[in-house]
Amino acid sequence: MLNNVKNVFRKIRISTVLYASLAVLILTLVISLIVVYAFPESNVFSSRLKSVLPYPIVVMSYQDGITYRTLSQNMVSVKRFYETQDFSKIGLRVDFSTEDGQKRFKVREKEVLNKMIEDKAIERIAKARGITVSRDEATQGVSRKLEEYGSGTEVRKELDRLYGWTLSDFEEKVVLPSLYQEKLQASFTKETAASTASVKEKILEAQKDLRAGISFSDTAKKYSDGDTAQDGGDLGWFALTDLLPELQTLVVAQKVGVPGDVVETELGFHIVLVEEIKKEDTKQLYRLKQIFTKKTTFSDFLSEKMRGLSVYVLSPEYEWNVAEARVEFRKQEMRDFEKNLYEKADGDAAFLF
């Protein structure tokens, strides 16, 4: 009988310990969830939790997700990159330890998060179309990159020095996303070949009208898809560096007052007229008119597809802008800081890359 009593008490003690442990575990989980999701201000404890535990920061269509931990790892690599550069040689300094520097780093984090979401979205869209990237293709992609950049040993050293990456990290973070994008873009180009041909036919009709003596302004009003169509295609003054590369080559070779040939860019088809050339300080400026027929671009396609995804941002610092298909800051203060930062980005090493 005494043994039975001991066994009962032993079972009670064991069950009590188990229940107590479970209660502590649940309480710890609740507290950690509150720290991570309820308070936007980072502190040592919350930063540690985010970098160690796989709490999601973004959930996509209830299936894919991005964790604070993965984002934190990527930001460690970003910080390492800037800290390993000697920007003093070009008279610049990057310091993320100041209040201003921390805000700059937060803006960089937002951009990294947007790139991670885009990479996930591209992979989802590609797979929905039956597009996959095999392990062999990824390995071959890494090999091509190594050949492109030089010695494999040197590349490995540079990846470790600049980002703290291994070749596996490089494959996962750079090569795989680029391969999915290449394949999806090729599929999109093939799919839109007919509509692109139609857009090209439209610009060729405009070219016929110009050669028949119809004025550039009237032709632009009739055919151009650009915002300036009703102004006769008037674009205003531009420096060469403000133009797409294909248009730069065309404008330099063109005679004033003579419409150029049809040229294709990633945006569509263009006929450009150089109306006037002048020098302002050290720059040569060109006054331009344009007839433009717009292609459906891969960027347009991707934005539309991303707007159709269910994206939930769980961080109290960010929110999902459905119309733009991008993460934005919740606080107006950070939005204003970001806007001002990009307006004055020239000469800021933190935004050169």
Image (cartoon, rainbow, N blue to C red):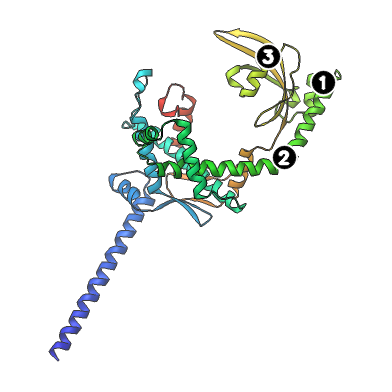
Does 82 sit left or right of 346 as displayed? left
**In the rendering, at what x and y percent does residue 272 appear?**
71, 20
User: How far across and how far down the image is residue 18, in percent?
Assistant: 25, 71
Identify the image quadrant of the C terminus: top left
> Is tag 2's residue or tag 1's residue first in the polypeptide sequence?
2
Q: Secondary structure at mark 3?
A: helix
Determine which of the numbered discs, if any, sits on residue 193 in the image: 2
Spot occupied by residue 115 in the image (x, y as percentages of width and height): 49, 41
Residue holding disc 1: 210
Pointer 3 or 1: first along the chain: 1
**Mark 3 and mark 1: Cα distance apart in space:** 19 Å
Estimate the spatial distance between the alpha carbons at disc 2 and disc 1, rounded to whole Å: 26 Å
Give amino acid for label 2.
Ala
Q: Amino acid at mark 1?
A: Leu
Q: Residue at x 79, y 31 (%)?
A: 202
**Of residues 1 and 174, which is closer to you in this image?**
174
Nearest the viewer among 261 and 238 is: 261
Going from the N terminus, do you reach mark 3 or mark 2 first?
A: 2
**Secondary structure beneath label 1:** helix
Q: Residue at x 29, y 63 (%)?
A: 25
Q: Which residue is mark 3?
A: 253
On screen, residue 248 versus residue 2, left or right, reads right
Q: Is residue 98 above or below residue 289?
A: below
Foreground: disc 3 or disc 1: 3
User: Depth-wise, is mark 2 or mark 1 nearer the camera?
Assistant: 2
